[in-house]
Amino acid sequence: MTKHALSLLPVLLCAPLTLLQAADLELSETVPLPESHSLGWVSANLQSKDTKSWDGVLDEARWGAPSPQQVVGRNWDWKISDQQWAAAVKEKGEGKQEDVKFDLWLPDGLEVVRGVVVMSGHGSGESLFRRADMRALARELHLALFKFVGNPVQRGFWPRSLLFERLQAFGNKAGHPELEHAPLFLYGHSNGTGFSAVFPSYVPERVWGWVSMRPGITFQVYQPGAAQVPGLVIFGEDDPFLTRPSKEENLAVVPVLRKKHAALWNFAVEPKTGHGPGEKTWPLVLSFLRHTFSARVPANSDARHSPVQLQQLSPESGHLGENWDPAKGGYQTLSTLPFASFDGGEKAGASWLVNAAYAADWQAFQRDGAVGQSR
């Protein structure tokens, strides 16, 4: 293994950062990284292949009729330390290098960054990074936007410290050293969920919320370590990935984490849509970002010297929402109530909604397919 795999920071800090635009600050860099950082490499070289270890909390369905060697592993609750990863890289080699592109955007005139929205560029993350409404919200809340794309990282990566190293490098260049310590909001589309759901299970104290958009492998969401970080999973009703291995099994993941770990998570199903989000999807994402930021990031927080201590939330502080019924399909009017008032039989598995305002947006999205307007 080369020195590059185990000691990335000195190498990457030397990579040039290019100023792209003058009003708002936009920095970009492209660096080669080895495939040993990728979630796929970690899965192939470090994840247990013992399918008997699956705890059976979900249906034992299979993808089609695979051979015994192709049984799908369902437990993504990995316990892999940085030391184990480094040992595997030393033993097996770091693999080929591929270019990874990192981008940072900061609104003009921002004095102190209060949080960073980090997006995998896999799928729709590229467009979210450049959306005007995303940038408008970032201006309002004093947030930075950070994106990465490239096979070694875009579907998830090891070690977790890689992200903080990049934020430190960009922060130093941009004159905002607080980027290294600012709280994070994570977005991943399809297999980008391997980033947005897995990352907070390792460093939940650094993440105020996360989104999985149309997960390609829903079992990436099975992350008990991230249970106390507010999460939103959005499915497309007609997404072919939702039926693999079964619609019922995929939709059970969030309720199972709610029941077993009191996860502060909710899910939504967008009717008549496939694997990609549309214009009516983004307002729900931005609503979730706004309201979780307000609930978790202290108003007087300052990340210039150390990581921000996020406010812990209790299940009782939120609202609950009746889960979308796959047997009915389509648009559904789902009840939402404060936690204490929700007395349905499915209270333990109901979607957890951070406050009344977000609950209203979530309910409108499931009823009308849009937030703040009728379909």
Image (cartoon, rainbow, N blue to C red):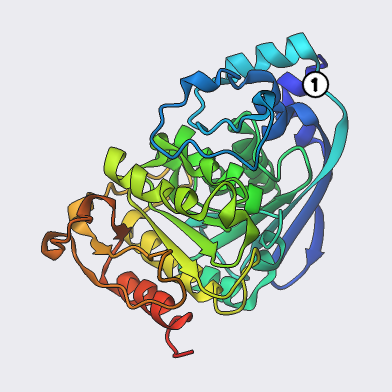
Camera-side residue of 23 and 243:
243
Q: Residue at x 60, y 14 (%)?
A: 84
Q: Residue at x 34, y 54 (%)?
A: 296
- Where residue 304 sits: x, y (%)? 48, 46
Furthest-front residue in this view: 65
The answer to whether 141 is drawn above or below residue 252 in the figure is: below
Q: Residue at x 62, y 50 (%)?
A: 216
Q: Taking the image as drawn, is residue 298 in sight? A: no
Furthest-bottom residue in this view: 374
The answer to whether 229 is drawn above or below residue 280 in the figure is: above
For mark 1, what is the residue? 94
In the structure shown, which secondary structural element does the residue marked by tag 1 occupy? loop
- Where residue 138 sits: x, y (%)? 54, 68
Camera-side residue of 97 and 66:
66
Q: Is residue 91 left or right of residue 96?
A: left
Q: Residue at x 16, y 63 (%)?
A: 342
